[in-house]
Amino acid sequence: MDYSKLNTENKVVDVIVINDSMSESDGIAFALELTGHSNWVMSEKEGRKNTGLIGSTYNKTLNGFILEKPFNSWTFL
C-alpha cells in the first residue's frame, strides 16, 4: 500500500510503499517509526477520491486528495 507524507498544510511531500498485509494503522505506525514524521495518510483507500500524489493536497472533509491545478482556469471534479 502507498502512504502519503503530509506537511503542515496537508500537502503531499513524499509517498512510500509499505507491505500490503499491514492494516492502515499499522502502516502509519511503521511509517512514523521509519521516518520520524507523524502525519501520514493511506494514499489509496476504498471510497477515497483520487490518489495521494506529490504536490496534491489531502482534504479530510472530502476524504480525498485534490490535485494541483496546472492553470488557475482549470477545475477538477
Image (cartoon, rainbow, N blue to C red):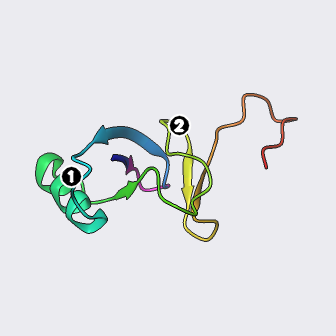
Residue 46 percent across, percent down from the top left? 52, 61
Residue of label 2: 55
Could you give the CA–CA distance between mark 1 and mark 2, rounded to whole angstroms? 19 Å
Q: Secondary structure at mark 1?
A: helix
**Against 18, is 26 above or below?**
below
Q: Residue at x 62, y 55 (%)?
A: 49
Q: Residue at x 20, y 64 (%)?
A: 26
Question: Label 1: how many residues lie within 10 Å, few (<14), some (14-19) or many (20+)?
Answer: many
Q: Earlier in the sequence, mark 1 or mark 2?
A: 1
Q: Which mark is residue 64?
A: none
Residue of label 1: 31
Q: Quadrant of residue 32?
A: bottom left
| Amino acid carrying mark 1 in the image | Ala
Q: Which residues are magenta?
A: 5-9
Q: Residue at x 21, y 58 (%)?
A: 22
Question: Label 2: how many residues lie within 10 Å, few (<14), some (14-19) or many (20+)?
Answer: some
Q: Secondary structure at mark 2?
A: loop
The secondary structure that most of the magenta stretch takes on is loop
Residue 8 percent across, percent down from the top left? 42, 56
| Amino acid carrying mark 2 in the image | Gly
Q: Residue at x 44, y 50 (%)?
A: 43
